[in-house]
Image: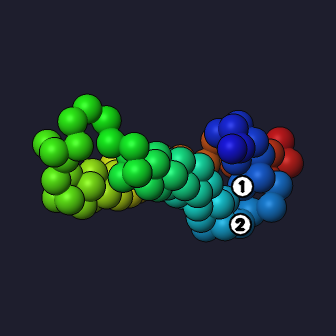
Amino acid sequence: MTRSGDNGIMMAVGGNRQGVVLLQTVELWIIHGIGFLLSLILSVFIPIGKSELVSPLDYISSLGAEAILIGGISALVAYLYTLVDPYRSIRRGK
């Protein structure tokens, strides 16, 4: 995953702000989404605790919670990257 400083430099040098925000958002979805789906699939075959107490609704609600969390974090990251351009002076040549 790229660091936020690297993203700022990419925005300053390349000037493709939407591409950088999209890259960061996709990285969040790939890294956290794949790990969550693998753990969810594994917990279906090896349930934690008593398997009689685990409902299919638990898995559906956890998928929804994960989508809301990653979506919220991605939206926050995209918002923060579009607020202020910290490298404006680099592009101006100062």
Q: Is residue 25 left or right of residue 36?
A: right
Quarter-wise, where is residue 52 in the image?
top left
Viewer can see residue 8: no
With respect to residue 53, does 64 lie above or below?
A: below
Residue 79 drawn at (x, y percent): 44, 53
Query: What's under tag 1, amino acid-wise?
Result: Met
Q: Give the side of residue 76 with respect to residue 23, left or right.
A: left
For badge 2, the amino acid type reads Asn
Other residues around mark 2 within 10 Å, as few (<14) / some (14–19) / many (≥20) = few
Please tell me how many numbered marks the rendered image carries.
2
- Callout 1: few (<14), some (14-19), or many (20+) C-alpha neighbours within 10 Å? many
16 and 33: which is toward the camera: 33
Q: Secondary structure at mark 2?
A: loop
Q: Nearer the viewer, residue 14 or 92?
A: 14
Q: Is residue 87 left or right of residue 55?
A: right
Whether residue 29 appears in this view of the structure is yes
* Mark 2 vs mark 1, CA separation in Å: 6 Å
Image quarter of the C terminus: top right
Q: Circle 1 is placed at which residue position?
A: 11
Q: Which residue is mark 2?
A: 16
**Which element is circle 1 on?**
helix
Q: Does the CB distance between marks 2 and 1 fall below 8 Å?
A: yes
Q: Residue 80 appears at what percent x and percent y?
A: 47, 47
Query: Residue 71's spot in the image, x, y percent?
Result: 38, 57
